[in-house]
Image (cartoon, grey):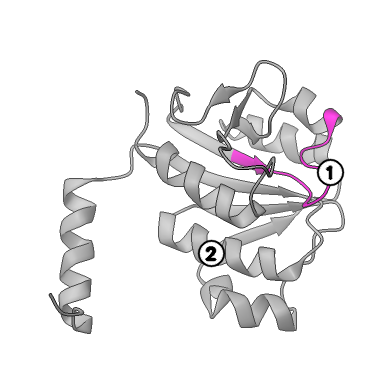
Amino acid sequence: MRPLKKVETKRLFEAAARDYPPKVELAFLLQSLEDPLNVGSMFRIADACGAVEIIFTGPTPTPPHEEIDRTARGHERRIAWRSIVRIDKAAAELKAEGYHLVALEAAQGATCYLEYDYPQKVCLVLGNESKGVYPQTLSLCDGAVYIPMYGKGPSMNVHVAGALVAYRALMGRR
């Protein structure tokens, strides 16, 4: 084996898009994230997933921001984003746009992310790095998913969890 050249990589991903097309329209809602590096990473993940947009709520840092720009590596210019300070207003707008809000949170009634029936239009709700998805936010969501943890830690980095669940969601209904 050898690494692919740029044109070969492009062809590989074009073929993959034909063979494994996304089955859902995807957006991300970032609720009160604190670390701009996580925000920058979410721009890269959103671009990789073909997400429609990222919605920021609460004090989540937004572009332009030196650390977001450095981590996002230009992807913050490719992905639409908007800031809606109040979570209740953001949830109402997204639902009016037809989105099904799915929280990534170990919560009562949550389904393993591998088993969830992702609808055609889904917005993944990612919570604060320390406190997770707030109870008020959970009450506004249509569902919740969790990632099984096999080690001693109860969670993984927010952008890593977002990427993992986003790619599963792209496959659509089970």
Tell me the residue that label 2 is attached to.
79
1 or 2: tag closer to the N-terminus: 2
Q: Secondary structure at mark 2?
A: loop
The reply, left or right, for residue 142 in relation to residue 46 is right
- In percent of width and height, residue 141 lies at 69, 27
Tell me the residue that label 1 is attached to.
131
The quarter in which the C terminus is drawn is top left
- In percent of width and height, residue 32 lies at 82, 51
In the figure, residue 50 lies in which quadrant?
A: bottom left
Give the amino acid at mark 1. Lys
Is residue 62 visible in the rendered image? The answer is no
Are there few (<14), some (14-19), or many (20+) residues within 10 Å of tag 2? some
Query: What segment carries the magenta color?
Result: 124-135
Residue at image location 56% in from the left, 30% down from the top: 98
- In percent of width and height, residue 97 lies at 59, 35
Give the amino acid at mark 2. Ile
Is residue 94 visible in the rendered image? The answer is yes
Residue at image location 53% in from the left, 79% down from the top: 74
